[in-house]
Image: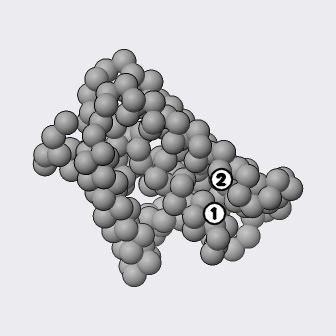
Amino acid sequence: MKINFKYILITAVAVFLSFELHELAHFITGECLGNKMAMTLNSGYPVNGFYLEEWQYTVISAAGPLFTIVQALFFYFLLKKKSNYYLYPWVLIPFFMRFSAMILSFRNPNDEARISTSLGLGMFTLPLLVSILLFFLVFKINQKYRYTKRFNFISILLIIFFYSAIILTDKYFHMQLL
């Protein structure tokens, strides 16, 4: 497992696509439910500032994390069949995304925290369950292929770098994609 230019590039693409497909899931779900939606690098939201029906907020909030979980499961099973460490970021990134969203929910409730609260489960029940599931996938792949601590540490640093670049770009340039 070498951290070479190819691995760094794949990690950058995986972070970008994981992030944008998560947001696109919010966008598409909102549009399918009849809302006129917009999307930036870091959010999908109704253009008029509210959803047509209150329940839609929960459904649209769920769409992004559900896509992220499906992504992690897809690449987990693919990686179990094919020993190709270039697929690893596609499993690690969903865990990082949802775990960091859980941590950030202390300040601003993210998708799972909003859903969990609306279902009366407490703010951190669903975020914790999703994070545990995604961590389990990462753990099992690490167990199978014996990825080193150094490899994981560098992978996480790369993810943090590219993840931060997306968030900061969105914050300062607020580029509307859709």
Mark 1 = which residue?
A: 110
Q: Tag 2: residue type?
A: Pro
Whether residue 5 is visible here, answered yes or no, is: yes
Asked if the residue under mark 1 is in contact with the one under mark 2, i.e. CB atoms within 8 Å, the reply is yes
Near-viewer residue (173 or 97): 97
Residue ID at (26%, 45%): 151
Name the image quarter holding residue 75. Answer: top left
**Quadrant showing the N terminus:** top left
Name the image quarter holding residue 147. Answer: top left
Secondary structure found at label 1 = loop
Residue 29 spot, x, y in % from top left:
64, 49
Secondary structure found at label 2 = helix
Neighbour class for label 1 at 10 Å: few (<14), some, many (≥20)?
A: many
Whether residue 31 is visible here, answered yes or no, is: no
Residue 69 spot, x, y in % from top left:
55, 40
Residue 145 spot, x, y in % from top left:
32, 27
Q: Tag 1: residue type?
A: Asn
Near-viewer residue (69 or 47): 69
Residue 158, relative to residue 165: is it above or below? above
Residue ID at (75%, 61%): 123
Mark 2 = which residue?
A: 127
Near-viewer residue (48 or 101): 101
Q: Which color mode does the image show?
A: one colour
**Outermost residue, bottom side:** 172
Neighbour class for label 2 at 10 Å: few (<14), some, many (≥20)?
A: many
Mark before the other along the chain sequence, 2 or 1? 1
Residue ID at (40%, 81%): 172
